[in-house]
Image (cartoon, rainbow, N blue to C red):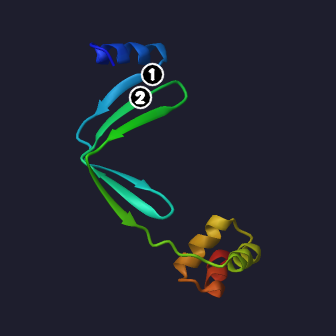
Amino acid sequence: MSRGGNREMRRMLDKMGLDMTTLENVEEVIIKTDKKELYLVKPQVIEMKGKDSTIFQVVASDIEEKQRDVPSYKEEDLILVMQQANVSKEKAVHALTESKGDIAQAILSLTT
């Protein structure tokens, strides 16, 4: 970007209808995926608010990555719990996780 880039950026954001604010004293940002967690320590966070949405720009130099313990269940076990308890897949997974994989206990916890 050319000289005065910050001023030009603010003008461009104003034209797009975005209000930009720097969030102060952010200690940590956590990003969770299905297999890992990213911990962004002491990041710089900029919030850009528009009419219908909010955009967060996160810049961090210290990133810690941890693998998540994601339980995996057989598809037929999930279908059985879903059918017997008449619940969504997410609720079936949660119930199986709470019951440590015990199908009968998962169904009972969802139906009683």
Residue 84 higher or lower than 26, as above or below: below
Residue underneath mark 1: 18
How crowded pointer 2 is (Cα within 10 Å; few <14, some 14-19, many 20+) is rated as some
50 or 67, nearer to the observer: 67
Residue 99 higher or lower than 64, as above or below: below
Q: Position of residue 112 (x, y in %)?
A: 65, 78
Residue underneath mark 2: 48
Name the residue rendered at 48%, 58% in the picture.
Answer: 33
111 or 18, nearer to the observer: 18
Q: Are marks 2 and 1 in contact (CB under 8 Å)?
A: yes
Q: Position of residue 54 (x, y in %)?
A: 47, 33
Residue at mark 2 to residue at mark 1: CA–CA distance? 6 Å
Residue 13 higher or lower than 25, as above or below: above
Three-letter amino acid code at the position of disc 1: Leu
63 or 32, nearer to the observer: 63
Three-letter amino acid code at the position of disc 2: Met
Name the quadrant of the N terminus.
top left
Circle 2 SS class: strand
Circle 1 SS class: loop
Figure disc tally: 2
